[in-house]
């Protein structure tokens, strides 16, 4: 009897174990949902051409529904997916939405290939293609051959920014749509104004509010979000250095500070110098480009309670640095806008800067109020930190903006031809090869170091034996040079003026309207503007 019971018990245990293994086998056969979704196609891209490419999308997983943005954790994360970008930066898209609305309701049609043509442009622009999260350069127009310009540094910085945003999309499991577009790396979009029926469009660092021709431009993050060589360095590092100087407003230097040169925008900057001359509450001095007298390192502006901002030849890239201090920024009435300016508030509970008149006639009154009412000044400074340093001027916000811009452009623009038929001499016979258009970003960065335009001139078209042909890429990821190419944006806007030959040795690359020099030797750190050669000034290559 006892033996019988033991055999029965053993049989029951065996049945239970078998059933359990069957259940485990079934459950393991179903792949778990990844925490970061994969691209829609879910496989390595084919080297064969395809007629279309899936729209970008993010498959949301359940745990993301309760996701919240935390500055300390996410500010430098360029891999946020589309859903998280919307949660983290809900108010960042004004300029993108404005452009989409303009084309839908004012132009009333999609953007065509003719609209992005650069035939009208002399220099300072390029045309590019994005396909399967890879950036390719189709054409450069006076980027590398205009003597004395800072266009090479600007173009490379923009390419690096876009490339970083695309890497972030890939890491987030998103494939952005294929698009073709043109970009201006000058201070102004300079879209044609003579013909009211003209519809040329491009991406630009800024646009002027009251210029109808600029309404066609799409405003993108400026090149200094990558780097300002020799002055501020990496934008991310500059943010960290400024943060180390955080203090209560009452413990900062109790003055309004500014550095720059007048000639980039005399209508604005000359009145500032006049309004502050000899005033005990102001540290406002014109920067001497030749001697670097009155230089202040960029991060040291954060030591002051009040920071004065001025426009230059157009917008000024300096503002992003000032808003990363925990100080009160004072801004005159603006004529130009950048991609984040819609977030500036000069009144109400969310006020994050102090507005002054364009001629600075009320500057004294506003400065004395802020120095006296420390509580109000601290409130404004705190709002600026929360809005800009902690959120909308972060690496995460910048890359989210690029990806949203790419997606929105695709919604209103033509679908580009990604491939082209090219005649190639293969083992002594001419054959037609189906190839990707243009040249890979990685290869172009290397070519750019030689200061060559793309496509190359006929004499440069045949490389020496053993060298890769520019633009010869079959499929994705084959034959592409992975050169990094340190592209560092320098200077920010440019002004008009001519410098002597001696001055050009330091300032030949131009400066930005915010006052930086292109070669990074402008040590005023917040806004000196380098003199230019007449050639560079003619083409807007000055600060």
Image (tube, rainbow, N blue to C red):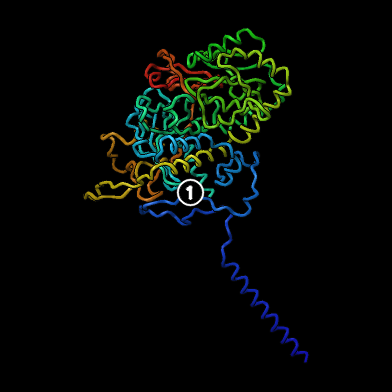
Q: Is residue 182 placed above or below 436 in the rendered structure? A: above
Q: Nearer the viewer, residue 245 or 40?
A: 40
Residue at 58%, 27% in the rendered image: 321
Q: Find the residue positioned furthest to the bottom.
A: 1
Residue at 72%, 25% in the rendered image: 248
Decide if residue 301 is in sight here.
no
Whole-percent x and y of residue 225?
53, 32
Residue at 54%, 22% in the rendered image: 334
Whole-percent x and y of residue 350?
66, 30
Quadrant showing the N terminus:
bottom right
The quadrant holding residue 362 is top right
The quadrant holding residue 341 is top right
Whole-percent x and y of residue 432?
26, 50
Q: Find the residue positioned furthest to the right.
A: 2
Residue at 61%, 32% in the rendered image: 388
Whole-percent x and y of residue 119?
32, 31
Q: Is residue 140 placed above or below 431 in the rendered structure? A: above
Q: Classify mark 1: helix, strand or loop.
A: loop
Q: Nearer the viewer, residue 412 or 294?
A: 412
Decide if residue 94 is in sight here.
yes
Q: Is residue 154 placed above or below 26 in the rendered structure? A: above
Q: Is residue 238 left or right of residue 213?
A: right
Q: Is residue 312 placed above or below 178 in the rendered structure? A: above
Q: Is residue 172 left or right of residue 382?
A: left
In the picture of the structure, the residue carrying the numbered disc 1 is 56
The quadrant holding residue 2 is bottom right
Q: Is residue 537 left or right of residue 462?
A: right
Q: How many marks?
A: 1
Q: Find the residue positioned furthest to the left.
A: 429
Crowd band around label 1 with a 10 angstrom C-alpha radius: few (<14), some (14–19), many (20+): many
């Amino acid at each position: 009897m006892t033996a019988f019971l033991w055999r029965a018990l053993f049989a029951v245990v065996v049945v239970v174990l078998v059933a359990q293994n069957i259940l485990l086998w079934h459950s393991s056969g179903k792949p778990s949902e990844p925490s970061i979704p994969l691209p829609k196609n879910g496989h390595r891209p084919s080297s064969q051409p395809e007629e279309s490419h899936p729209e970008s999308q993010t498959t949301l997983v359940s745990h993301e529904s309760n996701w919240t943005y935390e500055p300390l954790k996410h500010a430098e994360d360029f891999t946020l997916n589309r859903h998280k970008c919307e949660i983290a930066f809900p108010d960042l898209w004004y300029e993108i939405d404005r452009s989409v609305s303009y084309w839908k309701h004012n132009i009333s049609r999609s953007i065509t290939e003719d609209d992005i043509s650069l035939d009208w442009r002399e220099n300072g622009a390029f045309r590019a293609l994005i396909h399967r999260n890879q950036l390719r350069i189709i054409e450069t127009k006076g980027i590398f051959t205009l003597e004395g310009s800072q266009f090479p540094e600007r173009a490379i910085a923009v390419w690096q920014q876009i490339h970083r945003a695309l890497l972030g999309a890939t890491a987030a499991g998103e494939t952005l749509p294929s698009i073709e577009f043109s970009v201006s790396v000058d201070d102004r979009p300079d879209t044609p104004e003579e013909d009211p029926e003209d519809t040329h469009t491009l991406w630009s660092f800024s646009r002027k509010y009251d210029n109808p021709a600029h309404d066609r431009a799409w405003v993108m993050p400026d090149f200094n979000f990558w780097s300002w060589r020799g002055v501020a360095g990496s934008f991310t590092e500059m943010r960290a250095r400024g943060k180390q100087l955080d203090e209560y407003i009452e413990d900062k230097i109790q003055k309004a500070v500014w550095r720059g040169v007048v000639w980039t925008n005399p209508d604005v900057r000359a009145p500032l110098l006049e309004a502050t001359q000899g005033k005990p509450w102001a540290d406002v001095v014109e920067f001497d480009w030749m001697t670097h007298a009155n230089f202040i390192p960029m991060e040291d502006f954060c030591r002051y309670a009040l920071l004065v901002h001025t426009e230059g030849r157009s917008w000024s890239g300096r503002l992003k640095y000032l808003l990363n201090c925990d100080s009160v920024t004072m801004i005159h009435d603006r004529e130009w806008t950048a991609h984040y300016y819609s977030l500036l508030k000069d009144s109400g509970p969310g006020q994050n800067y102090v507005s002054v008149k364009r001629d600075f006639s009320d500057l004294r009154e506003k400065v004395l109020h802020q120095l006296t009412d420390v509580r109000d000044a601290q409130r404004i400074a705190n709002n600026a930190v929360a809005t800009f340093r902690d959120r909308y001027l972060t690496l995460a916000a910048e890359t989210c903006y690029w990806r949203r811009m790419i997606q929105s452009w695709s919604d209103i623009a033509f679908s580009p031809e990604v491939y082209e038929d090219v005649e190639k001499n293969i083992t002594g016979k001419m054959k037609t090869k189906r190839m990707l258009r243009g040249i890979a970003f990685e290869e172009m960065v290397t070519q750019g170091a030689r200061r060559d335009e793309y496509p190359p001139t006929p004499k440069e078209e045949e490389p020496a034996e053993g060298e890769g042909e520019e633009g010869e890429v079959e499929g994705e990821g084959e034959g592409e040079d992975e050169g990094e190419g340190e592209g560092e944006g320098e200077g920010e806007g440019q002004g008009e003026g001519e410098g002597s030959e001696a001055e050009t040795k330091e300032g030949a690359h131009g400066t930005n309207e915010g006052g930086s020099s292109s070669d990074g030797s402008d040590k005023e750190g917040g806004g000196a503007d380098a003199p230019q050669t007449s050639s560079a000034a003619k083409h807007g290559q000055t600060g």
